[in-house]
Each structure stands twice: as structure tokens, then as C-alpha cells.
Image (cartoon, rainbow, N blue to C red):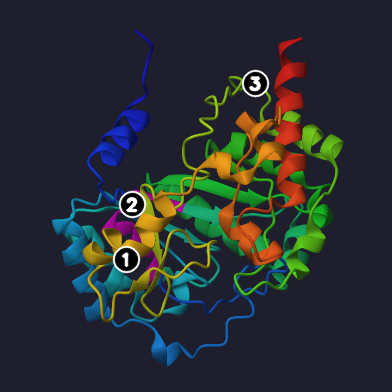
Amino acid sequence: MSYISPERFIDDLCIRHHILQKICVEITYRCNERCKHCYVFDEKKSSSEELSVNQYYSLFDDLRKMETLYITFTGGDPSMRADFIEILSGAVERGFAVSIYTNGIGYSEETLNEIINIRPAMMSFSIYSGIPEEHDEITGIKGSFKKTLETLKKVKSAGIMITVKTPVMTPTLKGFPAIQELCEELDVRSEISYFICATNRGNISPTKLRLGNVEKYKQLMKIARRNKELYVPQPRDIKGAICGAGTLSLSVNPYGEVFPCNGFNYLLGNIKDTPINEIWNGEALNKLYQLKFEQLGDKCVNCKWRDDCLYCLGSALAENGDIFIPVEESCKIARANYEFRLESLQ
């Protein structure tokens, strides 16, 4: 009998019983950094349209009834909401495993202590380079690297699980090895994203930061995966789903709009007028379930890199206006993954 990890077992169980396992809650698009790669920088709505604390409490109550396990709070940056502690407390008190994804620079010492006392399951911090100047150049805020690291260390010392999230960009290549060394030194998890996406409104300016080169991706993979067990992907089921969007999780933006994920601008409904359970079981999401990998056509179906491909419906829609037209950079990353694995076995 083959080994199945606890995570995979829970995933399979939730899929089998159509349980909404986790939800990403973007509580604001306001941010105290001005990152060059941000996928929401062209958002124009007013903060007055954001969901209220009571509206979030109603959402959490509905999610409890649906047996949802995980909530991730992100933005923008959660620290930009003066009532974030109330929202966070409401989620933890209702029994969810709560994660916070933040840049870490906007919390007063008092607020940070409150967060630590509430005991979220995990906090994730964005660090773009191990070289402070490179990181600060991306965020547009001088001293942001130092402040993020100070917050991370304080949360880590309190015994809360930490993840460092790093999107790969051309301007930060020099500092990439230093991030891995920092994570090893601090004994925190490193999560690398090799794909820079366009904004949800289709602005492609962030994509100019992409590496655009298979060999460069492979070089970074060697650094990121050194001394780690070689990852072997599951064989692609061409009659299965194209991606996991909406399979186990949903995303709610600051205004109550619900999407399959925060990178896929396919509106499913709004919790201001439709309960989340009705959206989860609604026709719009059901249409997404009907999409199969084989619908991408022969180029993708017969591609030798398909098992290593993280095909993104949202990026295809944002950049190409068509979910069935793959983004070229995704193909390069899939090829890099494939070749890296083969070369590692030699």
C-alpha cells in the first residue's frame, strides 16, 4: 500500500464530500508598500466599500456550518485595517486554523503582541531578496527589509509557525541565495513562487519582472531545493481538472466578491447578497468543475512537461483573454521543473 500524507488524505476527503476546506480572505487592498509586482495595484474601489466586522462574523458563522478548516487573511496588507484584531479574533474564536499573510511592517508593538496572544496557526511574510537594498527597491519603502525581519523574528520567538514567501523576479536574483540561507538560519519554511502574474484587471506591467529563461529558473531551483527530497509530481489526468481553483478553496475580496482563487477574475457571487454556501454549491462554480485538461488541446495534452505544469486559468484569462490559451512563461517554468528533475536523477 502506498503512503498517503495526512494533507493529501484531508484533501481527498474534502473533495469527495464537496467540503470547502479553506478560504482566502483579502480584507483590504490598501497597503503600506508599493511593490512593483503587485497584482492589485490598479484596484480603484474605495475602502468605504470594504466588508464590516459584523459581515465577516456572519461569513465565519456560515463557514463553521460548512465545516471549513482554514482561513488565510491577506490583502493589500491586513495591518491597514484598524479593526483587524477584531476580525482575527472572531475567526480564531470560532475554531478555524488561521494564517496571516503580511509584509509585517505596519504593526505597532501593541498590535503585534495582540496578534501573538491570539495565536494564529501561522504567519507568512513577503521577503523578495536577502539583500536589504534589493528588497526595499521592490517594495518602494526604505527600511522595509529590516522591519519585516524584526517582526518575523518576534513572531517566531513566540512559537508561531513562520513561512517566508518569495516570488522570483529579475531585479532580485542576486539576493535569492541569501533568502535561502536566511530561512535555514532562522529555521523557517521557504515558499518560492516562480511565476509573476499580470494584475487581475489585465495590466501586464508586473510580467516585465519575469526571468523569461529556462536555464535561469533551473539555477534558482537548484539553490531552493538543495538538501531537500526531490519532488515528484503526480501524473497529470488529462480528463481531470485543469487547475485546483475552486476545488478545495475560494477567495473573498474586500468587497465581498467571491472568486475561485485570488488570481482568477471569474466572479462567482457576492456574500453581501448570497450566502457563501449557496455560492459554493452554485451554477457558476459548477461550470468551472466541468472544465477538463484535455480541453486545452493537443499542444498541452501531448506536452512532455504537462506533469510539471501549474496551469493557471486566471493568468491565461488576464493575459490572453482566454482560459484555454496558456501563458508562455508557465510553459518555461514547467520545462525548467521537468529538466531539473531529470538532471537531479543523473
Give the labeled residue for mark 3: 227
Answer left or right for 225 relative to 65. Answer: right
Say if residue 190 shows up in the picture: no
User: How many marks can you see?
Assistant: 3
- At a point 71% along the width and 46% down the height, the residue shown is 330
Q: The magenta stretch spans which residues?
A: 111-123
Q: Nearer the viewer, residue 123 or 261?
A: 261
Q: CA distance from mark 3 to mark 2?
A: 31 Å
Measured along the vertical axis of the image, is residue 273 above or below residue 119? below
**Sooner in the amino-acid sequence: mark 1 or mark 2:** 2
**Sooner in the amino-acid sequence: mark 3 or mark 1:** 1
**Sooner in the amino-acid sequence: mark 3 or mark 2:** 2
Q: Which mark is residue 318?
A: none
**Is residue 136 covered in magenta?**
no
Say if residue 184 shows up in the picture: yes
Amino acid at dot 3 = Asn
Q: Nearer the viewer, mark 1 or mark 2?
A: 2
The reply to whether the C-beta atoms of the residues labelled 3 and 2 are less than 8 Å apart is no
Q: Give x and y (percent) for residue 301.
A: 64, 34
The reply to whether the C-beta atoms of the residues labelled 3 and 1 are less than 8 Å apart is no
Give the labeled residue for mark 2: 22
- At a point 24% along the width and 53% down the height, the residue shown is 96
Q: Nearer the viewer, mark 3 or mark 2?
A: 2
Q: Nearer the viewer, residue 185 or 45?
A: 45
- At a point 30% along the width and 40% down the height, the residue shown is 15
Q: CA distance from mark 1 to mark 2?
A: 24 Å
Q: Nearer the viewer, residue 184 or 333?
A: 333
Amino acid at dot 2 = Lys
Q: Give x and y (percent) for residue 309.
A: 64, 37
**Is residue 112 covered in magenta?**
yes
